[in-house]
């Protein structure tokens, strides 16, 4: 069977009629029939079940889509290796006996009819999934450097769909060579990037594998990657049943290094599956959106009307195989004359030209096209052409369009982010920070001075009431009114709205941050611009704007309303807000737990959201908590995203601030294993942030956050990059010390150290001494803290946190396999994260302490945060030894102070006696010069003070 036979499957002319039957039988094979009507949702895919932690190979065709999804959600580049091993049982012949028929079997194709083409599985999943799963699949496929669907064949109507929404979330970073000297980069949403598109199609039968040549074209031999599925891949030779007519897209993005880059400018590459004679709509679309179309052929019909269509705007290039038996020079010349093609538009593979030479010729031609493209187009703009050709667009659904309109009504008003926050989100910012300071002072009483404690607390309470009055004095802004109305909308509309909001706000922040970075770079060239640099630095810190700011504003509006009388209409109108957020939390959206800007929990707001969550789920639903901690920019959010398939913010300039919690459902088959119904994932901001390090209370901010989230967790992942392990050790010591001081902490969190960017297989063995040394240091710190707190029964770190040096350390290789932006995710990273995930689930299954239900978690969070707010001593130190040194210094200083006071008191008493006796002594000694006497006393006092000054220094 030739490649062309496989690719075309049946006679191409009959593909359209047969596709629907193929779809029906394929969905039955994959057991996906039910998802034709009830689409697959993210909640279904991300739920934790036994398949997620099972290492068994697929045993039947119905396992294949789930194995693909499991690996794809963990960005594993082996996801498309979708084979299964049938359990043959007693049917398998005895291998020790060989018959003549066995030899005949050697010449049979083992894949025929049994294995499924990976493209068919991908198309089946796209067709059976809702818009949000499609978007997530496209994003993860792009991270794996897989091609993603541009035009998806619609098997029910024989139409295709432009997958604009599915690609909306893909953001790419690259450096064109024009920016290589300045080390700048471009970061943008790929559907909004105006790029030339180069398309590759097939006309008739073709003996060369177009997709394999494309893979060689886009990658060099040192970084070869299978972007497109092709005949010589695993299961790539299986006949395609529903994926003919699929048009895929990928992007070549330069890194700015002339020795590495294949093309100096970014370029989109599209690939149409199947013969263009059977898929003329897709071909017409490509000809109207591409800068160039490369047509692969073995045989040309001189009357081919497809190639001579006058409406086509793209340059046409013909790529033929001279070695093919059906190749005709005369037909080629005739078509070339009709199309007005020169020899530069024709590439022929001859006997003396192998694939490498063909790729070289293609690269040269594409380079010339990209240098002076006759057309650049955003994918977003392609929707108009799609409509003209009768191609569906996935964004055309009423819910999506309504949500888009609602989101743009809010984000279109944003010009200056800082001013926008002040005008439209006034209840957060300085008001909320002042309230935070007053709340903490109410517990810590650091500035009470000589005032009565009760009076001081009453004074603080009055100040808080004034601030709440100020918050209530603001009318709800237009933006917040629109936001609350939009998230109150039913069904999928609010999910679309939140996605549109997040993407639009990211776009706005990205543009603003890019401008500020350029300004910062310019100002830094002149050292005299210190004040301007400081101002730009402040703007960089405050120019982030995301949906979390709108939810934060909701929380503040709600908390402020609680200070109004219960009958007040303003208060009653806002009582539904916690339920709205609880529904979103249940649907898989993250909720801000700790506000990173104010370093506080809006306790009443979060508590009421959790109370509503408790009401929404059945009573006594249990949750287990997994948290990640680490220094800034060590890949914490990326780790959680890869581990659980979720989407915490990881893009440039969007470092996590504070802490966010996200709920993942546990499937029935795992509930008995884990003894819980939900897993709560908490992502935290990077500790030791450079922008916070300059503040006086930076230690306090980090230590409070770490203590809270570790106290809430059943398993804490401590994410360590080797160069900042000291910083994490310091924070852990403070956490342990705080636990010793706070009586409320009653459970031991399990602690796992994850060492990122360590790929050496000998790392675990070689770092044995380092792990032992780390534990010894943590034990030393724990003992110092226990001694200070007079709790000397705690002799080691493991008395406070559950940790094993042998099983509690995980070494994970780097995220990228090669040189970004063209590097796929490293398979070793995905596999290591998967092993870590299995270990965490095993640890949670072995938890001695039972899981809390939602109400218990709420109470636990409240009491723990109250305890953290009471603490005003230990959080201000870098680590326990510094705190211990401070305590020793205080003890020594008190001793010195007492000795100094005693000696000075003795001297003053003696001086007073001498002064009282001055007259009597003067008569007896006939010396009555009082000035001389005072000079003598002053000299004695000065000598004594100098002596003590020298001692205290």
Image (tube, rainbow, N blue to C red):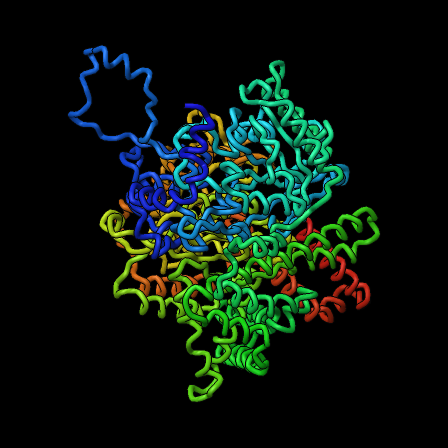
Q: Nearer the viewer, residue 52 or 543?
A: 52
Quarter of the N terminus within the rendering: top left
Asked whether, in this view, residue 216 is left or right of residue 131, the answer is right
Percent position (x, y) of residue 888?
52, 50
Q: Is residue 372 visible?
A: yes
- Does residue 25 appear to the left or right of 126 in the view shown? left
Q: Is residue 686 visible?
A: no
Q: Nearer the viewer, residue 341 or 930?
A: 341
Q: Single out the residue that lies furthest toward the front.
A: 303
Rendered residue at 52%/68% (across/down): 402
Q: For the view shown, which residue lies furthest in the left direction? A: 90
Q: Residue at x 57, y 18 (%)?
A: 323
x then y, percent, for residue 501: 55, 62
Above-or-below relation of 491 to 218: below
Question: Residue 197, position in %: x, y?
Answer: 64, 42
Of residue 7 and residue 614, the one placed in the foreground of this image is 7
Percent across and percent down for residue 670 are 26, 48
Q: Residue at x 58, y 49 (%)?
A: 651
């Amino acid at each position: 069977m030739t490649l062309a036979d496989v690719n075309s499957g049946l006679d191409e002319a009959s593909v359209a009629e047969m596709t629907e039957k193929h779809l029906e039988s394929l969905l039955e094979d994959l057991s996906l029939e039910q998802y034709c009507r009830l689409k697959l949702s993210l909640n279904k895919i991300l739920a934790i079940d036994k398949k997620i932690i099972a290492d068994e190979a697929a045993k039947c065709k119905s396992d294949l889509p789930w194995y693909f999804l499991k690996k794809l959600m963990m960005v594993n580049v082996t996801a498309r290796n979708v084979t299964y091993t049938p359990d043959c049982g007693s049917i398998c012949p005895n291998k020790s006996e060989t018959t003549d028929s066995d030899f005949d079997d050697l010449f049979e194709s083992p894949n025929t009819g049994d294995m499924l083409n990976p493209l068919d599985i991908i198309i089946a999943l796209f067709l059976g999934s809702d818009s949000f799963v499609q978007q997530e699949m496209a994003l993860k496929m792009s991270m794996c450097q897989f091609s993603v669907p541009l035009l998806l064949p619609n098997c029910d109507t024989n139409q295709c769909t432009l997958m604009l929404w599915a690609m909306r979330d893909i953001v790419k970073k690259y450096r064109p060579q024009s920016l290589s000297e300045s080390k700048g980069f471009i970061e943008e949403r790929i559907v909004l990037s105006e790029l030339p598109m180069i398309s590759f199609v097939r006309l008739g039968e073709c003996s060369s594998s177009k997709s394999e040549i494309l893979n060689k074209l886009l990658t060099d031999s040192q970084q070869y990657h299978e972007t497109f599925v092709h005949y010589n891949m695993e299961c790539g030779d299986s006949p395609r049943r529903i994926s003919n007519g699929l048009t895929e897209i990928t992007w070549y993005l330069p890194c700015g290094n002339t020795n590495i880059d294949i093309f100096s400018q970014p370029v989109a590459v599209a690939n149409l599956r199947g013969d263009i004679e059977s898929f003329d709509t897709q071909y017409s679309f490509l000809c109207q959106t591409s800068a160039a179309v490369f047509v692969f052929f073995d045989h040309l019909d001189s009357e081919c009307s497809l190639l001579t269509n006058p409406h086509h705007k793209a340059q046409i290039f013909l790529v033929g195989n001279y070695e093919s038996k059906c190749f005709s020079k005369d037909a080629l010349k005739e078509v070339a004359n009709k199309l007005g093609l020169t020899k530069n538009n024709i590439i022929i593979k001859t006997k003396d030209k192998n694939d490498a030479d063909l790729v070289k010729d293609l690269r040269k031609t594409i380079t010339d096209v990209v240098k002076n493209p006759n057309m650049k187009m955003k994918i977003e703009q392609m929707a108009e052409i799609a409509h003209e050709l009768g191609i569906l667009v996935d964004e055309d659904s009423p819910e999506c369009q309504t949500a888009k309109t609602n989101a743009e009504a809010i984000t279109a008003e944003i010009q200056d982010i800082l001013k926008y926050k002040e005008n439209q989100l006034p209840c957060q910012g300085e008001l909320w920070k002042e309230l935070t300071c007053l709340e903490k002072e109410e517990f810590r009483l650091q500035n009470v001075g000589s005032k009565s404690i009760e009076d001081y607390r009453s004074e603080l309470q009055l100040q808080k009431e004034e601030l709440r009055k100020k918050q209530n004095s603001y009318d709800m802004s237009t933006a917040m009114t629109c936001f609350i109305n939009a998230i109150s909308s039913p069904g999928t509309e609010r999910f679309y709205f939140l996605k549109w909001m997040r993407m639009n706000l990211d776009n706005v922040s990205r543009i603003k941050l890019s401008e500020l970075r350029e300004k910062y770079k310019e100002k830094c060239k002149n050292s005299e611009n210190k004040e301007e640099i400081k101002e730009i630095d402040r703007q960089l810190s405050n120019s982030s704007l995301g949906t979390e700011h709108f939810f934060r504003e909701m929380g503040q509006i709600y908390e402020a309303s609680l200070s109004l009388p219960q009958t007040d209409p303003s208060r009653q109108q806002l009582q539904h807000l916690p339920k709205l957020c609880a529904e979103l939390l249940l649907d898989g959206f993250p909720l801000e737990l700790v506000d990173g800007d104010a370093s506080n929990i809006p306790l009443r707001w979060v508590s009421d959201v959790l109370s509503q969550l408790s009401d929404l789920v059945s009573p006594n639903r249990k949750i287990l908590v997994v948290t990640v901690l680490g220094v800034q920019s060590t890949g914490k959010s990326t780790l959680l995203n890869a581990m659980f398939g979720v989407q915490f913010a990881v893009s440039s300039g969007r470092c996590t601030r504070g802490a966010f919690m996200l709920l993942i459902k546990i499937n029935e088959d795992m509930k008995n294993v884990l003894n819980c119904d939900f897993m709560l994932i908490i992502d935290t901001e990077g500790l030791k942030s450079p922008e916070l390090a300059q503040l006086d209370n930076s230690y306090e901010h980090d230590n409070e956050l770490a203590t809270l989230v570790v106290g809430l967790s059943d398993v804490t992942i401590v994410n360590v990059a080797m160069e900042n392990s000291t910083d994490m050790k310091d924070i852990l010591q403070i956490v342990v010390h705080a636990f010793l001081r706070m009586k409320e902490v009653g459970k031991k969190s399990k602690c796992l150290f994850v060492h990122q960017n360590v790929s050496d297989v000998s790392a675990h063995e070689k770092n044995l001494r380092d792990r032992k040394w780390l534990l010894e240091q943590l034990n030393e710190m724990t003992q110092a803290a226990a001694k200070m707190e007079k709790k000397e029964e705690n002799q080691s770190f493991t008395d406070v946190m559950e940790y094993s040096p042998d099983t509690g350390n995980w070494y994970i290789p780097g995220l990228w396999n090669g040189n970004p932006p063209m590097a796929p995710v490293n398979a070793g990273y995905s596999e290591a994260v998967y092993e870590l995930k299995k270990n965490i689930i095993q640890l949670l299954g072995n938890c001695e302490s039972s899981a809390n239900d939602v109400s218990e978690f709420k109470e636990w969070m409240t009491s723990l945060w109250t305890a953290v707010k009471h603490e005003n001593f230990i959080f201000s130190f870098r680590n326990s030894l510094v705190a211990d040194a401070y305590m020793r210094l205080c003890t020594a200083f008190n001793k010195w102070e007492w000795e100094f006071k005693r000696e000075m008191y003795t001297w003053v008493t003696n001086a007073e006696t001498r002064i009282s006796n001055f007259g009597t002594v003067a008569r007896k000694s006939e010396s009555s010069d009082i000035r001389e006497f005072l000079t003598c006393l002053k000299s004695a006092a000065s000598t004594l003070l100098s002596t003590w000054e020298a001692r205290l220094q």
